[in-house]
Amino acid sequence: MDNSQSDVRVRFAPSPTGHLHIGGARTAIFNWLFARKMGGKFFLRIEDTDQARNSKEVVDAIFESLNWLGLDWDDEPWYQSQRFDVYRKYAEELVRKRKAYHCYCGNDDDPPSENVAEQNKCKCYLLTVKEKEELDRKGVPRAIRFWVPDGTTVVDDQVYGSMEFNNSEIDNFVILRSDGIPTYHLAVVVDDHDMGITHVIRGDDHISNTPRHVLLYHALGWNPPQYAHVPLILGEDKKRLSKRHGAASVKEYAEMGILPEAMVNYLALLGWSPGNDREIFTVPELIEAFSINGISRKSAVFDPKKLEWVNSEHLKIYPTEKLLEKVLPSLLESHLITDFDAERKVPYLLEVLDLFKTRMKTTKDLAKYGRYFFKDPDRYDEKALRKYWEGLETKERLKKLKERLSALDEFKADKIEEVTRSLASEVGVPAAKFIHPMRILLTGFSVSPGLFEMMEVLGKDTCLRRVERGLKIL
Protein backbone atom coordinates (compact mmCIF):
# COMPACT_ATOMS: atom_id res chain seq x y z
CA MET A 1 0.00 0.00 0.00
CA ASP A 2 1.20 3.50 -0.79
CA ASN A 3 1.35 5.32 2.55
CA SER A 4 2.09 8.62 0.80
CA GLN A 5 -1.57 9.12 -0.09
CA SER A 6 -3.04 12.30 1.35
CA ASP A 7 -6.53 11.73 -0.07
CA VAL A 8 -7.35 8.82 2.24
CA ARG A 9 -11.08 8.59 2.99
CA VAL A 10 -12.36 6.01 5.47
CA ARG A 11 -15.64 5.46 7.26
CA PHE A 12 -17.15 3.89 10.32
CA ALA A 13 -20.63 2.53 9.61
CA PRO A 14 -22.52 1.22 12.67
CA SER A 15 -26.08 -0.12 12.62
CA PRO A 16 -28.16 1.66 15.28
CA THR A 17 -29.53 -1.51 16.83
CA GLY A 18 -27.48 -1.37 20.05
CA HIS A 19 -24.91 0.65 21.95
CA LEU A 20 -21.36 0.91 20.61
CA HIS A 21 -19.58 -2.25 21.71
CA ILE A 22 -15.88 -3.02 22.09
CA GLY A 23 -15.46 -4.56 18.62
CA GLY A 24 -17.16 -1.65 16.90
CA ALA A 25 -15.13 0.85 18.90
CA ARG A 26 -11.86 -0.86 17.89
CA THR A 27 -12.90 -0.72 14.21
CA ALA A 28 -13.73 2.98 14.55
CA ILE A 29 -10.38 3.63 16.28
CA PHE A 30 -8.38 1.90 13.51
CA ASN A 31 -10.21 3.92 10.83
CA TRP A 32 -9.80 7.19 12.73
CA LEU A 33 -6.10 6.64 13.48
CA PHE A 34 -5.41 5.80 9.83
CA ALA A 35 -7.24 8.88 8.59
CA ARG A 36 -5.49 11.19 11.02
CA LYS A 37 -2.08 9.61 10.32
CA MET A 38 -2.53 10.07 6.58
CA GLY A 39 -4.05 13.55 6.79
CA GLY A 40 -7.23 12.13 5.27
CA LYS A 41 -10.94 12.12 6.15
CA PHE A 42 -12.90 10.01 8.63
CA PHE A 43 -16.63 9.76 7.92
CA LEU A 44 -19.51 8.43 9.95
CA ARG A 45 -22.35 6.54 8.28
CA ILE A 46 -25.43 5.22 10.06
CA GLU A 47 -26.63 2.02 8.39
CA ASP A 48 -30.27 2.32 9.40
CA THR A 49 -32.08 0.51 6.60
CA ASP A 50 -33.69 -1.86 9.13
CA GLN A 51 -36.41 0.55 10.20
CA ALA A 52 -38.01 -1.86 12.68
CA ARG A 53 -34.83 -2.30 14.75
CA ASN A 54 -33.46 1.25 14.61
CA SER A 55 -33.67 3.76 17.41
CA LYS A 56 -32.83 7.46 17.57
CA GLU A 57 -31.81 6.98 21.20
CA VAL A 58 -29.24 4.38 20.11
CA VAL A 59 -27.95 6.67 17.34
CA ASP A 60 -27.47 9.43 19.92
CA ALA A 61 -25.72 6.95 22.24
CA ILE A 62 -23.33 5.94 19.43
CA PHE A 63 -22.51 9.61 18.79
CA GLU A 64 -21.98 10.10 22.54
CA SER A 65 -19.61 7.12 22.77
CA LEU A 66 -17.57 8.23 19.75
CA ASN A 67 -17.35 11.76 21.18
CA TRP A 68 -16.28 10.33 24.54
CA LEU A 69 -13.51 8.35 22.81
CA GLY A 70 -12.42 11.57 21.08
CA LEU A 71 -13.09 10.21 17.57
CA ASP A 72 -14.20 13.31 15.71
CA TRP A 73 -15.64 12.78 12.23
CA ASP A 74 -15.51 14.97 9.14
CA ASP A 75 -18.69 16.50 7.68
CA GLU A 76 -22.20 15.50 8.67
CA PRO A 77 -23.06 11.82 9.24
CA TRP A 78 -24.69 9.93 6.37
CA TYR A 79 -27.95 8.04 6.94
CA GLN A 80 -28.82 5.16 4.64
CA SER A 81 -32.53 5.62 5.39
CA GLN A 82 -32.36 8.93 3.48
CA ARG A 83 -30.94 7.32 0.32
CA PHE A 84 -33.44 4.63 -0.68
CA ASP A 85 -34.13 6.32 -4.04
CA VAL A 86 -30.41 6.25 -4.85
CA TYR A 87 -30.13 2.51 -4.15
CA ARG A 88 -33.24 1.73 -6.22
CA LYS A 89 -31.84 3.71 -9.14
CA TYR A 90 -28.62 1.68 -9.17
CA ALA A 91 -30.46 -1.61 -8.72
CA GLU A 92 -32.62 -0.89 -11.78
CA GLU A 93 -29.53 0.24 -13.69
CA LEU A 94 -27.99 -3.18 -13.06
CA VAL A 95 -31.18 -4.81 -14.38
CA ARG A 96 -30.96 -2.71 -17.55
CA LYS A 97 -27.31 -3.74 -17.97
CA ARG A 98 -28.39 -7.37 -17.56
CA LYS A 99 -26.17 -7.63 -14.48
CA ALA A 100 -29.20 -8.28 -12.26
CA TYR A 101 -32.77 -9.53 -12.73
CA HIS A 102 -36.21 -9.26 -11.18
CA CYS A 103 -37.01 -12.12 -8.83
CA TYR A 104 -40.58 -13.19 -8.07
CA CYS A 105 -39.73 -16.13 -5.78
CA GLY A 106 -41.00 -14.32 -2.70
CA ASN A 107 -37.71 -14.72 -0.85
CA ASP A 108 -36.16 -11.32 -0.17
CA ASP A 109 -33.12 -12.61 1.65
CA ASP A 110 -30.49 -15.09 0.62
CA PRO A 111 -31.36 -18.54 2.01
CA PRO A 112 -29.19 -19.62 4.97
CA SER A 113 -28.31 -22.92 3.31
CA GLU A 114 -24.59 -23.44 2.73
CA ASN A 115 -25.41 -25.52 -0.34
CA VAL A 116 -25.03 -23.09 -3.25
CA ALA A 117 -27.02 -25.33 -5.56
CA GLU A 118 -29.85 -25.12 -3.03
CA GLN A 119 -29.51 -21.33 -2.83
CA ASN A 120 -29.60 -20.94 -6.60
CA LYS A 121 -33.00 -22.50 -7.00
CA CYS A 122 -34.29 -19.14 -8.19
CA LYS A 123 -34.81 -19.42 -11.96
CA CYS A 124 -36.54 -16.07 -12.44
CA TYR A 125 -33.81 -15.01 -14.86
CA LEU A 126 -35.34 -17.53 -17.31
CA LEU A 127 -38.73 -15.75 -17.32
CA THR A 128 -39.80 -14.25 -20.67
CA VAL A 129 -40.83 -10.62 -20.99
CA LYS A 130 -44.46 -11.73 -21.34
CA GLU A 131 -44.28 -13.90 -18.20
CA LYS A 132 -42.80 -11.04 -16.21
CA GLU A 133 -45.45 -8.61 -17.44
CA GLU A 134 -48.15 -11.06 -16.37
CA LEU A 135 -46.63 -11.41 -12.90
CA ASP A 136 -46.35 -7.61 -12.60
CA ARG A 137 -49.99 -7.24 -13.72
CA LYS A 138 -51.05 -9.62 -10.96
CA GLY A 139 -49.10 -7.53 -8.46
CA VAL A 140 -46.67 -10.29 -7.51
CA PRO A 141 -43.93 -8.67 -5.35
CA ARG A 142 -40.53 -8.66 -6.98
CA ALA A 143 -37.04 -8.28 -5.61
CA ILE A 144 -33.85 -7.71 -7.58
CA ARG A 145 -31.07 -10.29 -7.57
CA PHE A 146 -27.51 -9.77 -8.74
CA TRP A 147 -26.47 -12.22 -11.44
CA VAL A 148 -23.10 -13.62 -10.38
CA PRO A 149 -20.89 -14.19 -13.44
CA ASP A 150 -18.73 -17.23 -14.04
CA GLY A 151 -15.05 -17.21 -13.07
CA THR A 152 -13.24 -16.08 -9.95
CA THR A 153 -13.03 -12.89 -7.92
CA VAL A 154 -9.73 -11.74 -6.41
CA VAL A 155 -9.58 -9.53 -3.33
CA ASP A 156 -6.26 -7.92 -2.46
CA ASP A 157 -6.52 -7.44 1.29
CA GLN A 158 -4.08 -5.27 3.25
CA VAL A 159 -4.10 -7.73 6.17
CA TYR A 160 -4.78 -11.16 4.63
CA GLY A 161 -3.06 -10.64 1.29
CA SER A 162 -4.49 -11.84 -2.02
CA MET A 163 -7.63 -14.00 -1.66
CA GLU A 164 -9.32 -15.74 -4.60
CA PHE A 165 -12.99 -16.73 -4.51
CA ASN A 166 -14.70 -19.09 -6.93
CA ASN A 167 -17.85 -17.36 -8.20
CA SER A 168 -19.64 -20.71 -8.47
CA GLU A 169 -19.71 -20.71 -4.66
CA ILE A 170 -21.48 -17.34 -4.52
CA ASP A 171 -25.27 -17.32 -4.89
CA ASN A 172 -27.24 -14.89 -7.04
CA PHE A 173 -27.80 -12.61 -4.06
CA VAL A 174 -30.64 -10.15 -3.46
CA ILE A 175 -29.65 -6.49 -3.73
CA LEU A 176 -33.13 -4.90 -3.47
CA ARG A 177 -35.98 -6.45 -1.51
CA SER A 178 -39.54 -6.51 -2.80
CA ASP A 179 -40.45 -3.61 -0.46
CA GLY A 180 -37.81 -1.41 -2.13
CA ILE A 181 -35.37 -1.64 0.80
CA PRO A 182 -31.76 -2.36 -0.25
CA THR A 183 -29.76 -5.21 1.23
CA TYR A 184 -26.48 -4.54 2.97
CA HIS A 185 -24.48 -5.53 -0.14
CA LEU A 186 -25.94 -2.88 -2.44
CA ALA A 187 -26.20 -0.09 0.12
CA VAL A 188 -22.62 -0.41 1.34
CA VAL A 189 -21.15 -0.46 -2.17
CA VAL A 190 -23.17 2.53 -3.40
CA ASP A 191 -22.42 4.52 -0.25
CA ASP A 192 -18.70 3.75 -0.25
CA HIS A 193 -18.52 4.83 -3.89
CA ASP A 194 -20.56 8.02 -3.40
CA MET A 195 -18.53 8.94 -0.30
CA GLY A 196 -15.29 8.41 -2.22
CA ILE A 197 -14.06 5.85 0.30
CA THR A 198 -10.50 4.75 -0.52
CA HIS A 199 -9.96 2.18 2.24
CA VAL A 200 -12.48 -0.10 3.95
CA ILE A 201 -11.18 -1.23 7.35
CA ARG A 202 -13.66 -3.61 8.95
CA GLY A 203 -13.98 -6.88 10.87
CA ASP A 204 -12.90 -10.09 9.17
CA ASP A 205 -16.43 -11.48 9.62
CA HIS A 206 -17.09 -9.44 6.45
CA ILE A 207 -14.53 -11.32 4.33
CA SER A 208 -17.26 -13.54 2.84
CA ASN A 209 -19.16 -10.39 1.79
CA THR A 210 -16.21 -8.79 0.05
CA PRO A 211 -16.24 -10.79 -3.23
CA ARG A 212 -19.92 -9.86 -3.63
CA HIS A 213 -19.03 -6.22 -3.13
CA VAL A 214 -16.14 -6.37 -5.60
CA LEU A 215 -18.49 -7.95 -8.18
CA LEU A 216 -20.97 -5.13 -7.66
CA TYR A 217 -18.25 -2.53 -8.09
CA HIS A 218 -17.18 -4.05 -11.39
CA ALA A 219 -20.78 -4.41 -12.59
CA LEU A 220 -21.39 -0.71 -11.90
CA GLY A 221 -18.16 0.27 -13.64
CA TRP A 222 -16.43 1.50 -10.48
CA ASN A 223 -13.02 0.80 -8.93
CA PRO A 224 -13.30 -0.94 -5.55
CA PRO A 225 -11.53 0.55 -2.51
CA GLN A 226 -8.61 -1.12 -0.78
CA TYR A 227 -9.75 -3.58 1.88
CA ALA A 228 -8.25 -4.36 5.27
CA HIS A 229 -10.08 -6.98 7.29
CA VAL A 230 -9.34 -6.93 11.01
CA PRO A 231 -9.45 -10.14 13.11
CA LEU A 232 -12.24 -10.32 15.66
CA ILE A 233 -11.77 -9.71 19.38
CA LEU A 234 -12.10 -12.86 21.49
CA GLY A 235 -13.04 -13.48 25.10
CA GLU A 236 -10.62 -15.23 27.45
CA ASP A 237 -12.11 -18.59 26.39
CA LYS A 238 -10.91 -17.79 22.82
CA LYS A 239 -14.50 -17.47 21.55
CA ARG A 240 -15.94 -14.36 19.95
CA LEU A 241 -16.35 -11.61 22.54
CA SER A 242 -19.96 -11.29 23.67
CA LYS A 243 -22.07 -10.35 26.67
CA ARG A 244 -21.55 -13.78 28.19
CA HIS A 245 -17.92 -12.76 28.76
CA GLY A 246 -19.16 -9.78 30.71
CA ALA A 247 -18.31 -7.57 27.73
CA ALA A 248 -19.78 -4.14 28.17
CA SER A 249 -20.55 -1.29 25.81
CA VAL A 250 -18.20 1.69 25.59
CA LYS A 251 -20.71 3.69 27.61
CA GLU A 252 -20.59 1.16 30.45
CA TYR A 253 -16.80 1.26 30.59
CA ALA A 254 -16.98 5.06 30.75
CA GLU A 255 -19.35 4.71 33.70
CA MET A 256 -16.92 2.27 35.36
CA GLY A 257 -14.29 5.01 35.49
CA ILE A 258 -12.14 4.18 32.46
CA LEU A 259 -10.47 7.19 30.81
CA PRO A 260 -11.20 7.63 27.07
CA GLU A 261 -7.48 7.93 26.31
CA ALA A 262 -6.85 4.63 28.10
CA MET A 263 -9.66 2.90 26.22
CA VAL A 264 -8.32 4.12 22.87
CA ASN A 265 -4.80 3.06 23.88
CA TYR A 266 -5.91 -0.43 24.94
CA LEU A 267 -8.21 -1.13 21.99
CA ALA A 268 -5.67 0.16 19.47
CA LEU A 269 -3.22 -2.49 20.69
CA LEU A 270 -5.79 -5.29 20.34
CA GLY A 271 -4.78 -6.75 17.00
CA TRP A 272 -2.29 -4.02 16.07
CA SER A 273 1.34 -3.63 17.06
CA PRO A 274 3.62 -0.59 16.73
CA GLY A 275 6.53 -2.96 16.18
CA ASN A 276 7.93 -2.79 19.72
CA ASP A 277 6.95 -3.84 23.24
CA ARG A 278 5.65 -0.45 24.29
CA GLU A 279 2.14 -0.51 25.78
CA ILE A 280 1.31 3.01 26.97
CA PHE A 281 0.64 5.64 24.29
CA THR A 282 -0.98 9.05 24.22
CA VAL A 283 -3.45 9.53 21.39
CA PRO A 284 -1.05 11.75 19.35
CA GLU A 285 1.62 9.03 19.74
CA LEU A 286 -0.84 6.40 18.47
CA ILE A 287 -1.60 8.52 15.42
CA GLU A 288 2.09 8.90 14.69
CA ALA A 289 2.80 5.17 15.09
CA PHE A 290 -0.28 3.69 13.38
CA SER A 291 0.00 1.68 10.17
CA ILE A 292 -2.29 -0.87 8.56
CA ASN A 293 0.84 -2.99 8.08
CA GLY A 294 0.93 -3.47 11.84
CA ILE A 295 -2.49 -5.16 12.00
CA SER A 296 -2.18 -8.84 12.86
CA ARG A 297 -4.11 -11.72 11.29
CA LYS A 298 -4.36 -13.28 14.74
CA SER A 299 -7.41 -12.55 16.88
CA ALA A 300 -6.71 -10.61 20.07
CA VAL A 301 -8.10 -11.52 23.50
CA PHE A 302 -9.91 -8.85 25.49
CA ASP A 303 -8.63 -8.75 29.06
CA PRO A 304 -10.56 -6.43 31.46
CA LYS A 305 -7.71 -6.58 33.99
CA LYS A 306 -5.22 -5.41 31.36
CA LEU A 307 -7.57 -2.55 30.42
CA GLU A 308 -7.67 -1.58 34.11
CA TRP A 309 -3.86 -1.61 34.26
CA VAL A 310 -3.59 0.57 31.14
CA ASN A 311 -6.11 2.91 32.76
CA SER A 312 -4.05 3.11 35.96
CA GLU A 313 -0.97 4.06 33.94
CA HIS A 314 -2.89 6.85 32.19
CA LEU A 315 -4.27 8.10 35.52
CA LYS A 316 -0.70 8.56 36.79
CA ILE A 317 0.21 10.91 33.93
CA TYR A 318 -3.19 12.59 33.54
CA PRO A 319 -3.23 16.37 34.23
CA THR A 320 -4.66 16.72 37.74
CA GLU A 321 -6.97 19.60 36.83
CA LYS A 322 -8.57 17.57 34.01
CA LEU A 323 -8.73 14.47 36.19
CA LEU A 324 -10.61 16.35 38.89
CA GLU A 325 -13.47 16.94 36.43
CA LYS A 326 -13.76 13.18 35.92
CA VAL A 327 -13.46 12.30 39.62
CA LEU A 328 -15.93 14.88 40.97
CA PRO A 329 -19.14 13.07 39.90
CA SER A 330 -18.31 9.97 41.99
CA LEU A 331 -17.38 12.15 45.00
CA LEU A 332 -20.72 13.93 44.72
CA GLU A 333 -22.67 10.70 44.22
CA SER A 334 -20.99 9.21 47.30
CA HIS A 335 -21.92 12.33 49.33
CA LEU A 336 -18.27 12.81 50.27
CA ILE A 337 -18.49 16.41 49.09
CA THR A 338 -21.25 18.82 48.09
CA ASP A 339 -21.40 21.15 45.10
CA PHE A 340 -20.46 23.93 47.51
CA ASP A 341 -17.40 22.00 48.71
CA ALA A 342 -16.40 21.26 45.13
CA GLU A 343 -16.15 24.99 44.37
CA ARG A 344 -14.68 26.03 47.71
CA LYS A 345 -12.12 23.25 48.12
CA VAL A 346 -10.56 23.01 44.66
CA PRO A 347 -6.98 23.56 45.95
CA TYR A 348 -7.48 20.82 48.56
CA LEU A 349 -9.05 18.44 46.01
CA LEU A 350 -6.12 18.97 43.64
CA GLU A 351 -3.65 18.18 46.44
CA VAL A 352 -5.58 15.02 47.30
CA LEU A 353 -5.70 13.91 43.70
CA ASP A 354 -2.01 14.63 43.11
CA LEU A 355 -1.22 12.34 46.01
CA PHE A 356 -3.79 9.61 45.37
CA LYS A 357 -3.91 9.25 41.57
CA THR A 358 -0.83 7.02 41.48
CA ARG A 359 -2.85 4.45 43.47
CA MET A 360 -6.01 4.62 41.33
CA LYS A 361 -7.17 2.09 38.75
CA THR A 362 -10.38 3.95 37.81
CA THR A 363 -11.73 7.45 38.32
CA LYS A 364 -14.11 5.97 40.93
CA ASP A 365 -11.31 4.82 43.24
CA LEU A 366 -10.88 8.05 45.19
CA ALA A 367 -14.53 7.87 46.29
CA LYS A 368 -14.19 4.14 46.92
CA TYR A 369 -10.86 3.88 48.72
CA GLY A 370 -9.97 7.47 49.69
CA ARG A 371 -12.96 8.38 51.86
CA TYR A 372 -10.62 9.38 54.69
CA PHE A 373 -9.64 12.51 52.75
CA PHE A 374 -13.20 13.76 53.30
CA LYS A 375 -14.57 12.04 56.43
CA ASP A 376 -13.13 10.80 59.70
CA PRO A 377 -12.94 6.99 59.73
CA ASP A 378 -16.06 5.41 61.24
CA ARG A 379 -14.32 2.08 61.85
CA TYR A 380 -10.81 0.66 62.07
CA ASP A 381 -9.75 -2.40 60.10
CA GLU A 382 -9.56 -5.30 62.57
CA LYS A 383 -6.90 -7.16 60.62
CA ALA A 384 -4.73 -4.03 60.64
CA LEU A 385 -5.25 -3.59 64.38
CA ARG A 386 -4.26 -7.18 65.12
CA LYS A 387 -1.09 -6.69 63.09
CA TYR A 388 0.03 -3.21 64.19
CA TRP A 389 -1.74 -2.22 67.42
CA GLU A 390 0.09 -3.30 70.60
CA GLY A 391 -2.44 -2.06 73.14
CA LEU A 392 -1.30 0.39 75.81
CA GLU A 393 2.25 0.66 74.47
CA THR A 394 1.02 1.89 71.09
CA LYS A 395 -1.40 4.26 72.79
CA GLU A 396 1.32 5.86 74.91
CA ARG A 397 3.65 6.24 71.92
CA LEU A 398 0.99 7.99 69.84
CA LYS A 399 0.10 10.32 72.72
CA LYS A 400 3.72 11.48 72.76
CA LEU A 401 3.75 11.88 68.98
CA LYS A 402 0.52 13.91 69.13
CA GLU A 403 2.18 16.30 71.60
CA ARG A 404 5.21 16.75 69.34
CA LEU A 405 3.00 17.28 66.27
CA SER A 406 0.89 19.85 68.15
CA ALA A 407 4.02 21.92 68.69
CA LEU A 408 4.87 22.08 64.98
CA ASP A 409 4.50 25.55 63.49
CA GLU A 410 4.97 24.23 59.95
CA PHE A 411 2.91 21.07 59.28
CA LYS A 412 4.88 19.84 56.30
CA ALA A 413 5.73 16.27 55.30
CA ASP A 414 9.47 16.62 55.95
CA LYS A 415 8.90 18.17 59.41
CA ILE A 416 6.32 15.52 60.33
CA GLU A 417 8.71 12.77 59.27
CA GLU A 418 11.60 14.34 61.18
CA VAL A 419 9.53 14.53 64.40
CA THR A 420 8.26 10.97 64.01
CA ARG A 421 11.63 9.37 63.35
CA SER A 422 13.30 11.41 66.07
CA LEU A 423 10.75 10.26 68.65
CA ALA A 424 11.08 6.65 67.51
CA SER A 425 14.84 6.91 68.02
CA GLU A 426 14.35 8.38 71.53
CA VAL A 427 11.92 5.64 72.54
CA GLY A 428 14.17 3.00 71.01
CA VAL A 429 11.71 1.42 68.56
CA PRO A 430 11.57 1.30 64.74
CA ALA A 431 9.69 4.22 63.13
CA ALA A 432 7.22 1.65 61.78
CA LYS A 433 5.85 1.31 65.35
CA PHE A 434 4.57 4.87 64.95
CA ILE A 435 3.85 4.95 61.22
CA HIS A 436 1.48 1.96 60.91
CA PRO A 437 -0.72 2.72 63.95
CA MET A 438 -0.86 6.40 62.97
CA ARG A 439 -2.07 5.43 59.51
CA ILE A 440 -4.85 3.31 61.05
CA LEU A 441 -6.04 6.23 63.23
CA LEU A 442 -6.04 8.65 60.31
CA THR A 443 -7.58 6.42 57.61
CA GLY A 444 -9.04 3.34 59.27
CA PHE A 445 -6.87 1.18 57.00
CA SER A 446 -3.36 -0.26 56.86
CA VAL A 447 -2.65 1.09 53.37
CA SER A 448 -2.66 4.64 52.01
CA PRO A 449 -0.39 7.02 50.13
CA GLY A 450 2.83 7.97 51.97
CA LEU A 451 1.86 8.77 55.57
CA PHE A 452 3.77 12.04 55.97
CA GLU A 453 2.64 13.46 52.60
CA MET A 454 -0.93 12.43 53.42
CA MET A 455 -0.79 14.14 56.81
CA GLU A 456 0.37 17.36 55.20
CA VAL A 457 -2.59 17.26 52.81
CA LEU A 458 -5.09 16.40 55.57
CA GLY A 459 -3.80 19.28 57.67
CA LYS A 460 -2.78 19.67 61.30
CA ASP A 461 -6.25 20.10 62.82
CA THR A 462 -7.71 17.05 61.09
CA CYS A 463 -4.76 14.83 62.00
CA LEU A 464 -4.75 15.84 65.68
CA ARG A 465 -8.52 15.45 65.93
CA ARG A 466 -8.47 11.96 64.43
CA VAL A 467 -5.59 10.83 66.64
CA GLU A 468 -7.37 12.05 69.77
CA ARG A 469 -10.65 10.43 68.71
CA GLY A 470 -8.97 7.16 67.78
CA LEU A 471 -7.06 6.94 71.05
CA LYS A 472 -10.32 7.32 72.99
CA ILE A 473 -12.08 4.64 70.95
CA LEU A 474 -9.21 2.14 71.02
Image: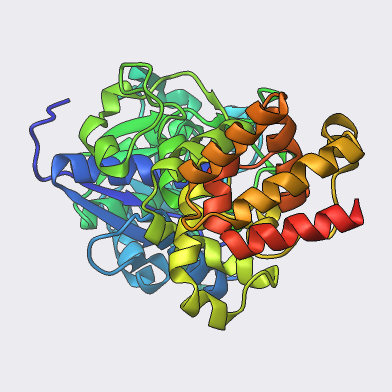
Tell me the quarter of the image containing the N terminus: top left
Residue 364 shown left or right of residue 47 in the figure = right
The residue shown at (40%, 20%) is 296
The answer to whether 374 is drawn above or below residue 38 in the figure is below
Query: Which one is nearer the viewer's eye here, 366 or 13?
Result: 366
| Residue 321 pos. (x, y %) | 38, 61
Residue shown at 62% from the left, 73% from the top: 337
From the top left corner, tell me how far across and down residue 336 is, in percent: 67, 69
* Residue at position x 91%, y 38% in the image: 391
Left or right, 450 with respect to 170, comes to: right
Q: Is residue 257 above or below residue 78?
A: above
Residue 123 appearing in the image:
no
Task: Kindly give the residue lying farthest to the front in the view shown.
Answer: 426
Relative image position of residue 157 (x, y in whole percent): 31, 25
Q: Residue at x 62, y 66 (%)?
A: 331
Q: Is residue 3 visible?
A: yes
Q: What residue occupies the far bottom of the structure in this picture?
A: 340
